[in-house]
Structure formats: structure tokens, C-alpha cells
Amino acid sequence: MGKAFGISRGDSLFRAGDVHGRVYAVRSGALKTIAVTADGEEHVLGFHLPGELLGLDSLGTGAHCAEAVALADTQVCEFPVQGILNRSAAVPELGAKMLQVLGSSALGSRVHVDLLLRRQADERVAMFLYDLLVRYGREGSNPSLILPMGREDVGRYLGLALETVSRSLTRLQEDALIEVSGRSVRVLDEDRLRRIAMLPDMPSGPPLEQQA
């Protein structure tokens, strides 16, 4: 059983080089993982939302390669890496679940790469917002989001200046795709947002295995 505890906004859950050997599940709140260059420049590597895991890098080396900082007062559940590995080896179902979790983590890294490959700032911002919709499970009729991160962190994640992020949000709002008020974003046209993000249309109809 994992140990649950809370951390305050701005506090670090772990730092690069820490050898705690722990994996964490986010119960509430949100965190960002960051890397800091030698000259003090911060790069955001990812955002971690309720129901997601972080610290999986320690599964390989036993040490964390990034710093995790709480974006809000956050509750997490801590699991020892060695305990997870031992139980995964003994319980096939748990081992399969861990592979699924690792696959989801790899997908998250791929999404970040795809974001950075988008040439236009509007495409990056649209894809970022759509990804948050999916991760929060908010797809549907005019869904709304409360962004746990500020625009500066969004820019550091997307490889864009703060002013560029703000201009892209304004353009998307002027085009009636979203409605922005502070950190609140309401999606007015989910299909167009997905198209601007250059994402393929969602499949319609039953899954293939049900069509056979």
C-alpha cells in the first residue's frame, strides 16, 4: 500500500539526482517536472495531473533525472520502486498494468515531441489544450478547463515565449474556438481545435473487433 501525503504549491517532491527510489501517483492538484540548465534556465518537461504517475525515471537507475514541483497544493501517494518491481514479478496482472503505465508515460513523451515539431505557435497551443481535454476526460459539449499551470510554464513546455502563448490564445479566442478568462479555458469548437492542432479525426462507429 502506498503512503499518502501532501505538498504545498511551489515545493519540490523530488530533485534531479535524488535516489529515494520512489514512484508517485497524483491524487489531487498537479505538478510539473523541470530541468534547469547550468545558467539557470528552466525547461518544463511535463505536467502531471490527478490519476497520473511521475518519477518513473527512477525505475531504471534508482535516481530521478528531473525535479518535480507542485503547481498547487497537491496530494500524492508514494510507492517504493523495489516493492513495485517485486510485486510485478510475483503478480502477472500487476506486471501487465505496469507495462500499460510505462506505455502511457512513453506516449506522453511522444506528445511532447509532437508539440515541439509543430511549426506554428497556434498549432502547439491547440494541441496542448486538446491533450489536456483528453487527460482530464473533458471531451464533449463545450468542455471547460482550469489550467493548473501559468502561461509562462506553458511557454516553457511548448518552446514558446510568454507573449507568443498569449497571442495564440487570443487568436484562438477571436476565431471562436475557445473562450479564455484567466486560467479558465472553455472549448467552443472541439473539432476545429483538433484540426488546428493537426490531429487526425477521431474514429466513428464501434471498434473494429465489434464490426467483424
Image (spheres, grey):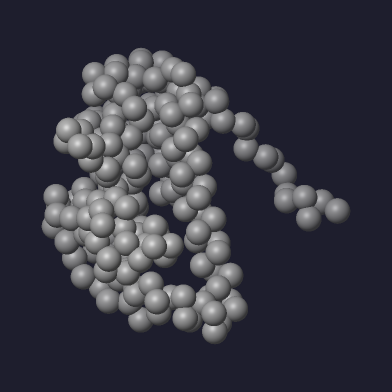
Can you tell which quarter of the image residue 143 is in? top left
Front residue of 113/185: it is: 113
The x and y percentages for residue 82 are 40, 76
Identity of the residue furthest to the right in this view? 212
Question: Against 110, is 12 above or below?
Answer: below
Question: Against 56, is 208 above or below?
Answer: above
Q: Residue at x 25, y 73 (%)?
A: 4
The x and y percentages for residue 41 are 20, 33
Q: Residue at x 35, y 66 (%)?
A: 62
Q: Residue at x 46, y 46 (%)?
A: 108
Q: Residue at x 82, y 51 (%)?
A: 211
Quarter holding the N terminus? bottom left
Front residue of 167/14: it is: 14
Q: For this view, does 111 lie left or right of residue 171?
A: right
Question: Against 107, is 186 above or below?
Answer: above
Front residue of 209/63: it is: 63
Question: Against 39, is 5 above or below?
Answer: below
The x and y percentages for residue 76 are 27, 65
Residue 53 in view here: no
